[in-house]
Amino acid sequence: MRKVNVSAREKFISLALATGKKTLNVEDIWAICNEADLKYPQWFTKDPENRAGRGLYKLPTANVSAVDLSAQVLPMKKTEIAPVAPVAQNRIANVSTDLETGNLVPEVYKNYVPFGNYEDLLAIVNSKQFFPIFITGQSGNGKTMSVEQACAKAKRKFVCISMTPETDEGDLLGNFVLINGQMEWRDGPVTTAARQGAVLCIDEIDYGAQNLSCLQRVLEGKPFMLKKKGEIVYPSEGFTIVATANTKGKGSEDGRYMFTNVLNEAFLERFLNTYEQEYPPVAVERKIIKKELTSAGRTDDEFAEKLVTWADVIRKTFSEGGVDEIISTRRLVHICKTYGVHGDRMKAVSLCLNRFDTDTKMSFLDLYTKLDAPAKEEDPITVNVPSHNEEVPF
């Protein structure tokens, strides 16, 4: 029989019919595309006529028999398609976003070293139960990354949203948007995560607007209403919520985390557990910094040892009230990346301390030069040791 050049659209339609299903979800569509090496058919998913519900699409009713499908590698199954009720002309279309069509499973970060609450997070993620938790701790100690990497390990979908004072109910649950002169509904990240059974991470939740009551029903794991649309959303299996914050929802008394809010007690009560995340132990942090230095192209175990020791001393002094600032694991990683660019230890340390006030910077630099005297000799100009006899709190 003569081989016919079948278009990508016709090929997709034929393979969709061959599944024998009446409707397709996003996973079905991706399976067809991966099997036949096709691009994701946005021409199909964005057509209001093909929608059978949120994330569900009706099989095309076009007559594909006119195309010679015997040339396809995959045979078709003969399927009778049930007639579908016509779509109302005034139906409001839904905007398709990357959260619906993209791969939400995060990649494994090769430099990540598990510590602290990671095993508990992994158990929660693997359970696929609705188990909302709250993680609190100092900035830059890996709270959000631990959740992301637990999802990467478990191959679970992960959706993360960072809160701001301007974040409102529409940003979280969804809103109407004007596209090409037509009002269309776009799901927010909370709704998308619920529909897809993903792990939702609400990052810096204490920076959000004070009125987060729109999430109280969501935090119970029950169906919740999109008030502006009049739709009830039924969360899929596996959906859960992890909130991260630098405070425990009581505000920042010491002023270190400005503009954090005091969260409603009824809101906080909906989290089953609260985890207190500390900085990684010295041995773990040493592994992290060694990996980061290698990734930066500057394998230097001695430098890693000095950085970790330096940060640990500062943290202990901070906990005793001796200093007002702290060196986070994130800042150590910044130093590694800077060292990778400039190849100079003191320059890397100095540049990454410039964010602190002058007294704090000079105190931290003075301590580091005591730990790494050779680095001071290599670059005496960068150190800028105080000329006066000011005491440092170490």
Image (spheres, rainbow, N blue to C red):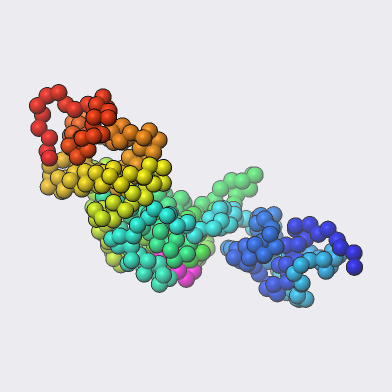
Residue 223 percent location from the top left of the image: 45, 68
Q: Main secondary structure of the magenta part?
A: loop
Tell me if residue 237 is in the magenta stretch.
yes
Q: Nearer the viewer, residue 6 or 81?
A: 6
- The answer to whether residue 301 is seen in the rendering is yes
For the record, the magenta segment spans 235-240
Residue 133 percent location from the top left of the image: 33, 63
Residue 239 percent location from the top left of the image: 44, 66
Location of the C terminus (image quadrant): top left
Q: Residue at x 90, y 68 (%)?
A: 1
Q: Residue at x 66, y 61 (%)?
A: 33
Residue 247 percent location from the top left of the image: 26, 52
Q: How many discs mark residues in the rendered view?
A: 0
Q: Which image quarter: residue 364?
A: top left
Q: Which image quarter: residue 267?
A: bottom left
Q: Is residue 394 above or below residue 115?
A: above
Q: Residue at x 54, y 51 (%)?
A: 176
Q: Nearer the viewer, residue 318 or 207?
A: 318
Image side of residue 1 versus residue 271, left or right? right
Q: Nearer the viewer, residue 308 or 180?
A: 308
Image side of residue 183 versus residue 216, left or right? right
Q: Residue at x 42, y 55 (%)?
A: 110
- The answer to whether residue 248 is seen in the rendering is no
Tell me if residue 305 is in the magenta stretch.
no
